[in-house]
Image: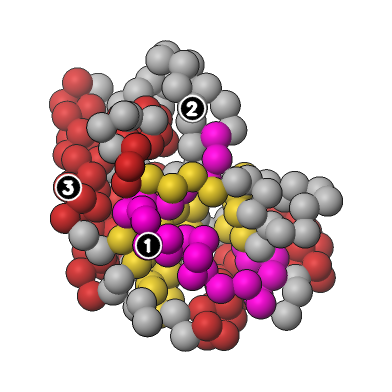
Amino acid sequence: MSKIKVITAYEGDCCYQDLTLGNMREYCQRWGYEFKANINSPYWKPLVYPHCMMWRKTEMLIEELHDCDWILWLDLDCFFLNMTVPLEGAFTDETADLVITGSFGPCPECGKAVHNVGLLSFRNCNWSREILTGWWDQEHERIKLNPAPEYTHCVGETLWLSCQVVENPVHVSHVKILPLAIAGWATITGSPDQFLTHQYAALQPAKRKMFEKLEQRVIR
């Protein structure tokens, strides 16, 4: 049986973190997955500048991958809608090394499909470590050219993984793309199969009410 680790991280104050962290923790306890949340942790302090929170997921994935078979990264605004559905078979597919959700639009520069990197899993293998290291290293190169955060081209956090890995023929055999109707961006009304959603809630206070409503819908 595969050992699965679920991780998330955040810095600052978030009006809904008790709801989303509680949801993630309950799901992981139900299925026996290790859960790790770095919230305002000293773990991140050396990287406060110039790396923004978007990029620190890469560092955490690199650091946490070594002692599990699969690692699932969840942005803090992800939420399990159905506690009875395990990750196995969806986010731990034995034919892939990276599992990511379907496209939500084209890259503004190259036209390739852009995928949601706030919800993805990596297998513990050499390919994953090489990709994660490349993902991290290219951010250092971006900083040398332009210290200001900028995500409108293919070296951005989301666009780099989408355009240079997921949509790259060299790597396509390593990647599984999940339908958005199973797990993905926002909640697809009328899709009973969607068990995990990413709401892109950022810090908007009004989003707490949204998660409170989602909590009432959770299947246990």
Question: Is 39 left or right of 130, judged from the image as shown?
Answer: right
Residue 130: numbered disc = 3
Question: Is 163 left or right of 89, judged from the image as shown?
Answer: left
Q: Quadrant of the N terminus?
A: bottom left
Q: Secondary structure at mark 1?
A: loop
Residue 94: numbered disc = 1
Tell me, yes or no, if residue 72 can be seen here: no
Location of residue 28 with respect to 208 vertically, above or below: below
Question: Is 31 left or right of 218, judged from the image as shown?
Answer: left
Using the image as rendered, state which of residue 123 and residue 23 is in the foreground: 123
* Residue 38, x across and y down, in percent: 38, 68
Q: Are marks 1 and 2 in contact (CB under 8 Å)?
A: no
Q: Give the mark nearest the N terminus, 1 or 2.
A: 1
Q: Are marks 2 and 3 in contact (CB under 8 Å)?
A: no
Q: Say which residue appears at 17% left-offset and 47% top-offset.
A: 130
Label 2 and label 3: CA atoms lie apart by 22 Å
Label 3 and label 1: CA atoms lie apart by 19 Å
Q: Quadrant of the C terminus?
A: bottom right
Residue 99 forms part of the magenta stretch: yes
**Residue type of the residue flagged with mark 3:** Glu
Q: Say which residue appears at 37% left-offset and 56% top-offset.
A: 95
Most common SS among magenta residues:
loop
Using the rendered view, name the quadrant where residue 168 is placed: top left
* Residue 10, x across and y down, in percent: 44, 59
* Residue 192, x across and y down, in percent: 77, 59
Q: Secondary structure at mark 3?
A: helix
Q: Would you call the spot at circle 3 few (<14 residues within 10 Å), some (14-19), or many (20 or more)?
A: few
Over which residues does the magenta segment extend?
79-103
Label 1 and label 2: CA atoms lie apart by 24 Å
Q: Which residue is mark 2?
A: 113
**Residue type of the residue flagged with mark 2:** Ala
